[in-house]
Amino acid sequence: MSFDPADLMAPPGEHDPLRHHRPDNNLGYRNKDDAVKKLADLLPELRSLHDRLNAQRTWSLLVILQAMDAAGKDGIVKHVLTGFNQQSCHVTSFSAPVGEEVSHSFLWRCTQPLPARGHIGVFNRSYYEEVLVPRVRTEYIGYQRLPPQCVAGDITDLKHGFRSKKAFKEFAEKLDSRGQKAPANPPKEFWNSRLEDINAFERHLARNGTRIVKFFLHLSRAEQKKRFMTRIDDEARNWKFSSADVRDRENWSQYHHAYSEILSTTSTPWAPWYVIPADYKYVARLAVARTLIHELSQLHSRYPKLDKEGRKALAKAKKILEHEG
C-alpha cells in the first residue's frame, strides 16, 4: 500500500488549495497497525538518506511544520524526526516573539537556527506565524512597533504603497501620543509584502543550497475539539491546554482563509507546501516520513569517494595497524 507525495503538494498559485484535501483522508491505511509498521520500516531509509546528506555536506534541509493547535506537530518530531542523527538535526520551536525578537524584522529570529550544510533544521512553527496570527488577531501588530508608513502599505512601492495620502493619514491618526502603536487592521498590501519577503527569503536559501520542505498538518475542527477534550480530561495532559486555544477556535474560518492564502502564495518549486491529513495521527506521521524520503532522494547525496592520494593514505594506515604488536 502506497501513495504519491506529489498528491499532497499544494500547487503554486492555486486558489483555496485546501479544498482538495480532506483532513480525514487515511491515504489507504485503514488499519493503524499497518501504518505504524510501515513507518517503522521507513525510518532506517530516512536515517540512511540523512547520513549521506551529512557526509557529503553540500545541501542542507529545512523542514517547516505549521498547523492549528493539537494537530500533532510534536508527535511528528517525536515519532518521525527523532529517526535522524541528532548530532546534525536540530529542532527549534517558535512561540510568540518577545524581547529582542520584537526589535528586529519578523524574519530575524528564524535566521539564527538555519541548518548548516549537511544538516537538517526543523522549525516547529516558523516565520509563517507572522502572516497568520497577527492577521487574525491584529492587536499583535501594535506590539511590533513598526513605523506607520510600513504598516500602511508597501513602503518600497512608491506609486501604490500607501494607496493614497488620505489612507496614510487615517492610519497615522490612530497612533498614540508617543508613536509606539502601529495602526490596527493593516491593509492587504501589508500582508502581500510580507508574503513577498518570505518568497524572496526562501529563494535566497534555495540559491545557497538549502532545500525547504513545508508541511501543513490539516486538522478538522471536530477532531481538534476531541483532542482538546482529551487534554482537559487527562491530568497528565492538562499542561498542554490553554484557554487561548478555545478563543482561537472562534476564528477558525479566518485562520483557514489565512492558511489557504499562505499555501497559494508561497508554495513554490524550490519550497513546496505539502498538505498532510492530520485527523489520524498515524497517517500524518507516515505521510511526513514518506515525503521526506522523496525530498531527500531528490538531492542525490552520496558518500564522498577518496581520490588517488586518499586511497594511498588509507592503505598506508591499514598496513601500520596490521603490523602493530
Image: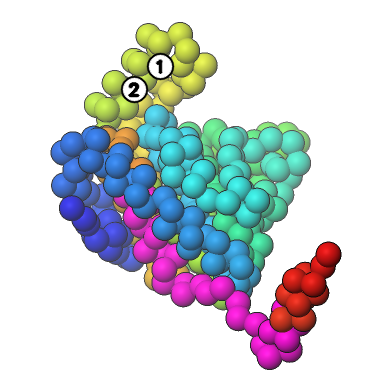
Separation (CA) of disc 2 from disc 1: 6 Å
Does residue 160 sit above or below 223 in this rendering? below
List the residue tagged with mark 2. Answer: 227
Does residue 270 sit above or below 259 in this rendering? below
Q: Residue furthest bottom?
A: 308
Q: Does residue 105 appear anywhere in the picture?
A: no
Q: Which mark is residue 231?
A: 1
* Left or right: 285 as drawn, with respect to 56: left
Kindly state the secondary structure of the residue where label 1 is placed.
Answer: helix
* Residue in front for this viewpoint, 164 or 205: 205
Contact between marks 2 and 1 (CB within 8 A): the answer is yes
Quadrant position of residue 12: bottom left
Kindly state the secondary structure of the residue where label 2 is placed.
Answer: helix
Display colour scheme: rainbow
Residue type (three-letter) at the residue carrying disc 2: Arg
Residue type (three-letter) at the residue carrying disc 1: Arg
